[in-house]
Image (cartoon, helix red, strand yellow):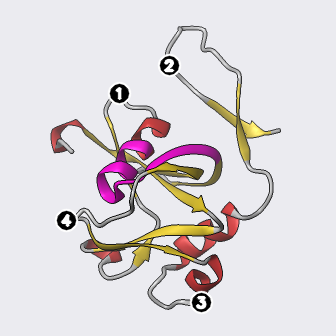
Amino acid sequence: MSHENTNWSQSVSAVCIREGKVLLARHTYGSGNGKLIIPGGYVENGEAPQEAIKREYLEETGVVIEPGELIGIRFNTHDWYVVFRAEYVSGEAHSDGEENSEVVWMEPEEALSREDVPELTKQMIRSAFKPGGWSSAPYSSLKNNPCSLYCVQ
């Protein structure tokens, strides 16, 4: 990722589900160092969140995903972070050797019981397995800007 094109105030993540398991990556830096977390990252300038999470998953894990419903949003005065439920499309999961040291498919119950899985990741895993969520709804802006609307339907 080009750091000069990074929007440091917008980040995305997703809980990818395949055959009942979730994909986790062992982070190699920052506050998540050594922890198994759901993959994600920052949005690039001009990039939609859905495209950003597809790019991040492919870069970090080698897995192609399709983001679905929003299952979590965290925001404050400095930034926002959105989390999608995502479906596995293709690819063999592997570490990128930089941002993570391992990538594993794991039963949700195991992830929820592990001490090396942070609480935010655990909460998003719980949310991913609950029915419903915000769904994409038809919407076009008055200014014809690319945009998306998610709401409970």
Between 77 and 67, the one nearer to me in the picture: 67
| Residue 16 on image: x %, y % | 55, 58
- Please give the range of residues in magenta: 54-69
Q: What element carries label 1?
A: loop
Decide which of tag 4 and tag 3 comes sooner along the chain. 4
What residue is pinned by disc 1?
46
Q: Tell me residue 145's x, y (percent).
A: 50, 15
The residue indicated by pointer 4 is: 98
Residue 3 as seen in the image, left or right of residue 60: left
Give me the disc on residue 125: none
- Residue visible at 48% across and 81% down? 117
What is the spatial separation of the Cα atoms under label 1 and label 4, in whole angstroms? Answer: 25 Å
Where residue 146 is drawn, which disc sits there? 2
Kindly indicate whether the residue at mark 2 contacts the one at mark 1 (C-beta within 8 angstroms): no
Q: Which of 53 and 74 is in front in this view?
A: 53
First reached walking from the N terminus: tag 1 or tag 4? 1
Q: Label 1 vs label 2: CA separation?
A: 10 Å
Q: Name which residue lies at 49% across and 79% down.
A: 118
